[in-house]
Image: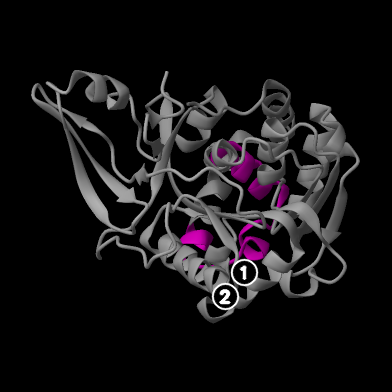
Amino acid sequence: MSFCLPAPLAAAIETLVASQRHDEVVRRLALVSTHYRQGRTSEVAIATPADVAAYLSARMPATYAAVCAALSATRELMPDFSPLSLLDLCAGPGTASFAALSLWPEISALTLVDTNPRFLDAARSLGETSGVSAMREAKFIRSNLASAYDGLSADVVMMSYALVELPLDEIAEHARRAWELSRELLLFVEPGTPEGFRRILICRDALIEKGAHLVAPCPHLEACPMPQPAWCHFTQRLARSRRHRLVKAAQTSYEDEPFIYLAFARTVETLRPRGRLVSRARVSKAQLRFGLCRDDGHLVEEVVARRDRERFARLRHAAWGDALFPDGPRNEP
């Protein structure tokens, strides 16, 4: 499934980016990328209007697609959940908020928290220009994360691409505090890198210990069975716009965004799959093979012989990241 920016949002980004000189946006993108690679925060990396334009052009489409993929996988297991309020912590330019609104348009109460005023201004501007009513009426709070918890709560609390900016020894406490603000669902999305996975595992352990109900992606509460140096992650493909290709000097018309996520809910009345694919399915003349994290906490390579026609037909379209149920994947074409 592809998750492209909605046309009004893409047009709003284009309007904002077009106000900056293209060569300056490209130059600032290189500096922004350097800041992030060196572990600096968004407050440092995004310091000028051209930095914002560079981020919106080069990073927001991929981050949006990854958050949509994580939310879609979560919603599959919570089909009756219909939230009305959202709290976006470390919101940046509102990427996670726009993604959540695309899947749950009934959300009407929206609060975005970030330390960077340029990002918050961008989120506000994109909401106004794109005509998304919940974003136009959203509450924008400039605050660091530690000061943002008092008095806030929502049906859904989200933190996307934020843990990677936090000190390791603070992640567990921030995860617990964010959980306290969530009335129903808490979602983390991080880069699908070894470091992103490391930080997700810290959240996972902290919230399982606190008794939170793990919805996705893990089908179990056991210790993660992924052996080092491998790491659990998924990949979301997205089409690149002309602006996206120009800013990144990219040759291909698409991009693959690696990501990892965690979803925790208050209710235990969620669908439980028998496992989740943690690799691409590999099809040969004789069989189908894929890595499967099972509901018993084991990581196995599942093999389906082509001669098992019924089962092979059910699983041949299973994709990396899919939840598997006894009758096969739910989202196969």
Q: Are marks 2 and 1 in contact (CB under 8 Å)?
A: yes
Whether 106 is drawn above or below 294: the answer is above
User: Residue 32, percent across and down?
Assistant: 55, 54
Helix, strand, or loop for circle 2? helix
Residue named by callout 2: 172
Direction from residue 130 to residue 200 in the image, left or right: left
User: Residue 222, percent across and down?
Assistant: 39, 65
Residue named by callout 1: 175
User: Residue 155, percent across and down?
Assistant: 77, 51
Residue 22 magenta: no
- The quarter of the rendered structure image containing the C terminus is top left
Q: Which residues are magenta?
A: 34-62
Whether 172 is drawn above or below 301: the answer is below
Q: CA separation, marks 2 and 1? A: 5 Å
Mark number displayed over residue 31? none
The amino acid on which the numbered mark 2 sits, given as a three-letter code, is: Ala
Whether 93 is drawn above or below 254: the answer is below
- Kindly give the residue lying farthest to the bottom in the view shown: 169
Q: Specify whether residue 9 is in view.
A: yes
User: Residue 115, percent across and down?
Assistant: 75, 64
Q: Main secondary structure of the magenta part?
A: helix
